[in-house]
């Protein structure tokens, strides 16, 4: 890639490149005037065809601080290293300009970590927070993480922040540690506990419930290690997140990360899955399955930032989730030790867990336990256990937490229009929405009309069957709309083969193999099929039903005008004779062999004249 400083003639191409990412919710829009006024800070990358395929801006706030801004890479060169190359060039330029510190706000933390950046607290950069972030429409729901890199030598007396929860907005100052202080010194001083076991520091997937709250002191007691809690906000609701950080610290955690991953969940996991058409056993839209790799991915990333040597989860030893967590750990960092307390401890009941919590002063809110086991996120709510353990029992209406029953849904239907570009949903009723907000909007509409309820007896990965009831209103709408648009835009052979791919893709997601090379290879096939899947679909929502009422695409293969052309323009009916002869030739040959020498085909009608009448 050829990298150079941007020129005025590059501005239209820069804006077009940025707009690709703006439509997906990855970047904030930039005006021609803003690019023109800061043109000296922009850099572009060209491919071998001399096309601009990457851009980035070096935005300086103070003499000591600058931001990596508006990094955009064209989808046409995705995965070829263009982003890494242009950021390296920007780092070199920042060094040349004697800028001591670079930072970025990003949703792709691993990308920046590989370039040498470290995670930190966004509030460390007040210039950015108060100048730009306060004016951002999603400031209160920001899902970006701050990363930074020191470029110039730092004196020993310089202090840097210890990474703390990125979403924390506490008024307390950021805790500071001397730069020259290493981990061993901290342990010797008692800041970090000394450990005589093989595990020194563990990152726990933490939900704030009874099980994971008890796991914190159990890990400290049994592994003599520091415990860092990580909670992913993937749309499970504010109630589950309220007071979570304080609870984890009170349980004995040394640090807590609470990351808003709703945008990443929707854009990088849910939308690719929708594009694939993956549905497990013809009904399950994989709400829990697809979320676990995202959580585990961030555990691994935080473990690497914090220098942890282990990760832990609260999944039981008889379910699917243990596999989904641990396969992701293995794929992303196989050197990490995996701790699964449910496979080790002697806690076997809620009463055991409550007793352990009391003995170790773990704060637990005593609430009446539901008879159902539930999992909720942006995509769905699942229900298991209780009366559902008998497949013959009808689910209780009181069990459903999200959707209205079809019987109680409005008597008037509602029409929703969804626009897609390359298989990615962009707008609902002509209003462009970021990925997570788009799903939330469809959830709201679908839940009101009783859409997306599924009662399923499924085959678990571990071999046993289980029954689950799922509420996936927005997902059901999206799948229906996407399928209908594909019916216009994909040819028969591609469409039929993609259906087979969808079954295998769903198995890989259900089995926890999101980061398997086969899933990634299938995604490449899916991405290719989606190049023409652009257009809109209208759906009528009515009492649990999603009814297609219209679809349109400039890439539609359905052409009524072709059918009205003269016979030699598109299709000559006489061609059918030769086609049918060749298409059925093997069937004809087999039948001819059967009738040779006076025989009969196996399908020949019997001779009823030889039957006697009573």
Image (cartoon, helix red, strand yellow):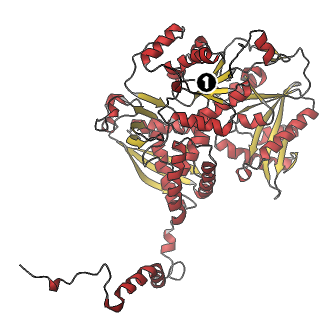
Residue 209 seen in this snapshot: no
Considering only vertical position in the picture, is 160 above or below 111? above
Nearest to the observer: residue 588 or residue 470: 588
Location of residue 182 in the rendering, given as x and y in whole percent from the top left corner:
81, 18
Quarter the C terminus occupies: bottom left
Nearest to the observer: residue 101 or residue 596: 596
Q: Residues within 10 Å of mark 1 (few under 14, many from 20)?
A: many
Q: How many marks?
A: 1
Q: Spot the residue most to the left.
A: 614
Q: Residue at x 32, y 82 (%)?
A: 601
Residue 99 seen in this snapshot: yes
Q: Secondary structure at mark 1?
A: strand
Considering only vertical position in the picture, is 503 above or below 142? below
Image-based side of 369 in relation to 56, left or right:
left
Q: Residue at x 78, y 13 (%)?
A: 186
Q: Residue at x 60, y 32 (%)?
A: 295
Location of residue 20 in the rendering, given as x and y in whole percent from the top left corner:
69, 47
Image-based side of 2 in relation to 297, left or right:
right
Considering only vertical position in the picture, is 466 above or below 558? above
Image-based side of 276 in relation to 135, left or right:
left
Q: Which residue is mark 1?
A: 204
Nearest to the observer: residue 513 or residue 126: 513
Location of residue 388 in the rendering, given as x and y in whole percent from the top left corner:
34, 33
Location of residue 596 in the rendering, given as x and y in whole percent from the top left corner:
36, 90
């Amino acid at each position: 890639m050829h990298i150079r400083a941007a020129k005025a003639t590059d501005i239209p191409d820069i804006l077009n490149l940025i707009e690709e990412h703006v439509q997906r919710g990855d970047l904030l829009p930039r005006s021609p005037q803003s690019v023109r006024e800061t043109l000296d800070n922009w850099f572009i990358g060209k491919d071998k065809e001399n096309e601009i395929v990457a851009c980035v801006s070096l935005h300086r706030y103070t003499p000591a601080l600058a931001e990596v801004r508006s990094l955009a890479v064209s989808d046409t060169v995705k995965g070829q290293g263009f982003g890494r190359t242009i950021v390296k060039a920007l780092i070199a330029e920042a060094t040349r300009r004697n800028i001591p510190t670079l930072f970025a706000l990003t949703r792709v933390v691993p990308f920046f970590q590989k370039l040498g950046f470290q995670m930190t607290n966004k509030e460390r950069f007040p210039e950015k927070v108060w100048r730009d972030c306060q004016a951002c429409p999603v400031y209160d729901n920001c899902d970006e993480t701050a990363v930074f890199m020191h470029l110039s030598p730092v004196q020993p007396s310089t202090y840097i922040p210890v990474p703390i929860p990125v979403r924390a907005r506490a008024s307390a100052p950021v805790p500071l540690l001397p730069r020259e202080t290493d981990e061993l010194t901290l342990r010797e001083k008692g800041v970090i506990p000394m450990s005589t076991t093989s595990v020194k520091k563990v990152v726990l997937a933490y939900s704030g419930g009874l099980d994971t709250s008890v796991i914190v002191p159990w890990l400290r007691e049994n592994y003599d290690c520091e415990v860092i809690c990580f909670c992913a906000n993937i749309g499970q609701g504010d109630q589950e997140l309220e007071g979570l950080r304080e609870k984890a610290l009170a349980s004995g955690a040394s640090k807590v990360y609470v990351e808003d991953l709703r945008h990443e969940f929707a854009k990088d996991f849910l939308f690719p899955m929708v594009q694939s058409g993956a549905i497990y056993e013809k009904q399950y839209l994989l709400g829990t399955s697809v979320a676990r790799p995202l959580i585990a991915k961030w555990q691994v990333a935080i473990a690497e930032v914090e220098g942890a040597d282990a990760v832990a989860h609260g999944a039981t030893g008889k379910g699917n989730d243990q596999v989904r967590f641990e396969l992701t750990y293995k794929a992303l960092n196989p050197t990490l030790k995996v701790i699964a307390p449910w496979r080790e401890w002697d806690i076997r009941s809620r009463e055991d867990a409550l007793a352990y919590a009391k003995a170790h002063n773990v704060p637990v809110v005593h609430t009446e336990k539901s008879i159902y086991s539930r999992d909720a996120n942006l995509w769905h709510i699942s229900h298991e256990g209780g009366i559902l353990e008998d497949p013959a029992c009808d689910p209780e209406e009181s069990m459903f937490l999200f959707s209205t029953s079809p019987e109680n849904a409005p008597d008037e239907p509602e029409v929703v229009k969804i626009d897609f570009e390359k298989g990615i949903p962009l707008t609902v009723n002509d209003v462009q929405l970021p990925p997570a907000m788009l799903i939330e909007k469809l959830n709201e509409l679908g839940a009101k009309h009783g859409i997306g309820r599924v009662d399923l007896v499924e085959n678990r990965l571990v071999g046993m069957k289980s029954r689950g009831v799922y509420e996936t209103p927005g997902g059901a709408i999206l799948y229906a709309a996407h399928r209908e648009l594909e019916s216009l835009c994909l040819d028969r052979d591609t469409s039929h083969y993609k259906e087979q791919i969808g079954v295998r893709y769903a198995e890989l997601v259900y089995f926890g193999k999101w980061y398997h090379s086969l899933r990634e290879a299938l995604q490449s096939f899916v991405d290719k099929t989606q190049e023409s899947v652009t257009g809109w679909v209208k759906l009528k929502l009515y009492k649990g039903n999603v009814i297609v009422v219209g679809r349109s695409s400039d890439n539609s293969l359905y052409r009524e005008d072709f059918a009205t052309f003269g016979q030699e323009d598109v299709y000559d009916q006489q061609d059918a004779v030769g086609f049918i002869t060749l298409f059925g030739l093997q069937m004809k040959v087999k039948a001819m062999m059967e009738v040779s020498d006076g025989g009969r085909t196996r399908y020949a009608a019997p001779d009823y004249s030889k039957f006697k009448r009573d």
